[in-house]
Amino acid sequence: MAVMSVSRVAPAPSTRPGARSGARAPSRGPGPSSSFSGRGSRRCAPLRARYGMTLGEWCDENGEYGDKLLEEWYDPDRTVEEVTRGNRVYKGLWRCSAGCTKDGEAFTWEATVGHRTNSERPRGCPGCARKSPTDQNNLLQWCQDNGEHGRKLIEEWAEPTLAMKDVTPGSTKKLSWRCLAGCTEDGEAITWEASPNNRTGSLRTGCPGCAGKSPTDQHNLLQWCQDNGEHGRKLIEEWAEPTLAMKDVTPGSEKKMSWRCSAGCKEDGEPFTWEARVHDRTGSDRTGCPGCSPSTPISLQKRLGKVAR
Ligand SMILES: [Zn+2]
Ligand SMILES: [Zn+2]
Ligand SMILES: [Zn+2]
């Protein structure tokens, strides 16, 4: 093989482009018959390798892997003699020779020649690498193979234009899901975004509404306050967020919100306002207005006019 290939780089560079393009089309036909042309060609080989060796020539010198690339080259516009082996710009079309399929056809993908002949990390078929959805590896298939959890994902899928078969189970793209367990927001079933990877991996996440992480009609701060007597009524009174409604926050939220004292302490003539996490006001360690608290720092007491300045 190596001897043959050296012989084939014999023509001077000027005659190269047209010389073998015809012989190689279609790309995976048998190579042109060998013609030995002596040792002179050996001297040009390194130069050509660096600057001008075609993909076809490179494949001829690279044994089984080269044969594989020749077999997989599927580009409609160029033959393997019409691209240089290091080309990192032109995206050729390739067709998997290892059996993975998409919608019943051999899987095809685009990649630059340079990416496939890179000696350190040659890139292979993304279908075989499970990076692209194939008939053998896709989210729908995964769901069908994963019993009850899989059936649930199929039901919860809420992407309007994307099919589950066109996504990999390991995809990290955020996609839409719709809760079917009954939690609602403003009367509509909760929808949320999560990657297939999150939903199929070991830490399978579910509906954030059901998990109490997102506010729902069934579980929100306003509802919590209405269910928690006097303390709840106080929180409703003290809520001081200008644009956020209590129903759009969870009782366990760790976010800081604004509150306004309902017990009469004032700053510059206005009811004292402060920030506190929702959770700190609904949890077991409920904090109240820092202005009213006996442990208020002197500095704040001064600000509030509670001690002589
Ligand atoms: Zn493949
Ligand atoms: Zn839910
Ligand atoms: Zn107060």
Image: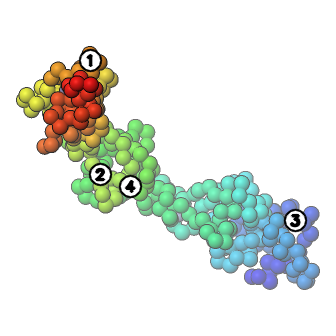
Q: Are marks 1 and 4 in contact (CB under 8 Å)?
A: no
Say which residue label 3 marks: 16
Mark 3 CB near ligand 1 (8 Å cut): no
Which numbered disc covers residue 197? 4
Q: Residue at x 65, y 65 (%)?
A: 116
Left or right of 65, for residue 216: left
Q: CA distance from mark 1 to mark 2?
A: 45 Å
Which numbered disc covers residue 205? 2
Q: Residues within 10 Å of mark 1 (few under 14, many from 20)?
A: few
In primary-sequence order, the first of circles 3 and 4 is: 3
Q: CA distance from mark 4 to mark 2?
A: 10 Å
Q: Position of residue 88 (x, y in %)?
A: 71, 58
Q: Residues within 10 Å of mark 4 (few under 14, many from 20)?
A: some
Q: CA distance from mark 1 to mark 4?
A: 51 Å
In primary-sequence order, the first of circles 1 and 4 is: 4
Say which residue label 1 marks: 270
From where the camera sits, is residue 140 visible?
A: no
- In the picture as drawn, the residue positioned furthest to the left comes out as 229
Mark nearest the camera among 3 and 4 is: 4
Q: Residue at x 19, y 22 (%)?
A: 265
Q: Residue at x 27, y 52 (%)?
A: 151
Residue nearer the viewer, 300 or 245:
300
Q: CA distance from mark 3 to mark 4?
A: 48 Å
Mark 1 CB near ligand 3 (8 Å cut): no
Q: Is disc 3 placed on a helix, strand or loop?
A: helix
Could you tell me the amino acid type at mark 1? Glu
Could you tell me the amino acid type at mark 3? Arg
In primary-sequence order, the first of circles 1 and 2 is: 2
Q: Residues within 10 Å of mark 2 (few under 14, many from 20)?
A: some
Q: Position of residue 122 (x, y in %)?
A: 62, 68
In primary-sequence order, the first of circles 3 and 2 is: 3
